[in-house]
Image: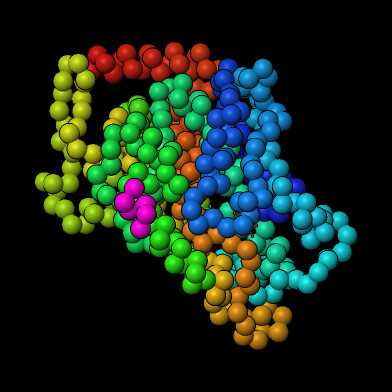
Amino acid sequence: MLRFITAGESHGPALTTVIDGLPAGVPLDIELINRDLARRQKGFGRGGRMLIEQDKAEITAGVRFGQTMGSPVTLVIHNRDWENWQDRMAPAGSPCGPAVTAPRPGHADLTGVLKYDRQDVRDILERASARETAARVAAGAVMKQLLSAAGIQILAHVTNIGGVQAAAARPAFAALQAGVLASELSCFDTKAEAAMKAAILTAREQGDSLGGIFEVLAVGVLPGLGSHVQWDRRLDTKLAAALMSIQAIKGVEVGAGFAYAGLPGSKAHDEIYYDPARGYYRQTNNAGGLEGGMSNGETIVLRAVMKPIPTLMTPLASVDIVSKAPLQANTERSDVCAVTAAAVVGEAMAAIVLTEVLLEKFGNDNLPDLSAAISRYRQRLSGR
Ligand SMILES: Cc1cc2nc3c(=O)[nH]c(=O)nc-3n(C[C@H](O)[C@H](O)[C@H](O)COP(=O)(O)O)c2cc1C
Ligand SMILES: C=C(O[C@@H]1CC(C(=O)O)=C[C@@H](OP(=O)(O)O)[C@H]1O)C(=O)O
């Protein structure tokens, strides 16, 4: 069974990820992990914190001479900003400086202090912060290296920021990848990107923030990952939950998603064809590569919507948790828009889920056995 957890506060010394259940013999390139960490940091609209951090992963367990050993893999990312926060984040000693008592609407602040019986909102916001997603991206970058050995590639791109929509028709995967990697916002549509940046600038000038939509694509996924037999084994269930687990994500679509509401059945479903060379295939992909809780061999297409960043420089109304007097919410240094970053986190979460179901189907002891099991399965399918 593949499991992963993260630990660490936003301004603590480090973030840690432990991945348990990876097969032995997976070649790991630390540069590929660091490349995704750098991608997560970018995106027009990020705040001052990203000028301080230069995320790099350190592998502290589970890998020797560039290969996994089957034992838990542990990755550590040091927070450079810790230097500036040691007094306020010390694990021992007495509180230093005033407590944060002005909870921000849209953040975990108020419900967190009530539930965990804390007097300082910082005790909540430190872990609620999406700084934690750096640890997820490191884990996802490990999984991507395993998936690529199975011919699976994952990429996310931004399709909407603050209502500015990218062109509906996206290019083929390789061209999309080149466009996304070259773009400051991870959006292949350069015209829309210019308007998106303008919208972010306006929001920043007004002390406001923006959300948006990103799309995650997984190509080369074999048919039959996930299962129709139980609700929690459906691949849609796992992928949607994984994307919904990202801070500020408020909705997820698979394939045509909410557009299905306007389509009759005759236009909604992807007709099935057969070609001796290709096997079974579809000419459309409204299903987004998922039918009956299983991958069907077509590209997996998922979209997620991110709400606008809750910390505003023109703050919203709130209440002091000590005096109960009305006030304006806490204004911390903050991103104005982080949809590009969230898209990279979306890739990581999809990679983690696809690795889980791949290993569940084909075994997780070592990469050669896994590859042999996948080849046998492909062979069997090619005869059907
Ligand atoms: C990559 C990323 C960066 C974020 N940056 C900020 C930020 O700078 N300021 C902020 O208030 N919220 C930011 N958020 C959103 C909050 O973390 C999120 O809204 C909060 O944890 C509450 O969770 P919820 O929106 O899922 O309810 C960011 C989210 C992501 C995914
Ligand atoms: C640190 C990151 O994002 C942070 C997410 C975040 C939040 O509230 O979610 C608040 C901000 O933190 P800070 O108050 O330190 O500026 C963001 O910078 C990161 O993505 O690495």
Q: Quadrant of ligand 1?
A: bottom right
- Res. 113 visible in picture: yes
> At which x and y percent is residue 331?
62, 70
Relative to 211, is 158 above or below?
above
Outermost residue on the right side: it is: 93
Residue 192: say if magenta. yes
Q: Which residues are magenta?
A: 190-195
Name the dominant secondary structure of the magenta segment.
Answer: helix
Name which quarter of the figure residue 162 lies in.
bottom left
Relative to 4, is 252 above or below?
below
Q: Quadrant of the N terminus?
A: top right
Q: Quadrant of the C terminus?
A: top left
> At which x and y percent is residue 79?
70, 47
Q: Residue at x 21, y 57 (%)?
A: 261
Q: Residue at x 68, y 68 (%)?
A: 121
Residue 367: say if magenta. no
Relative to 278, is 45 above or below?
below
- Res. 291 visible in picture: no
Name which quarter of the figure residue 76 lies in.
top right
> At which x and y percent is residue 212?
40, 57
> At which x and y percent is residue 247?
52, 55
Q: Residue at x 44, y 67 (%)?
A: 202
Q: Nearer the viewer, residue 143 or 334?
A: 334
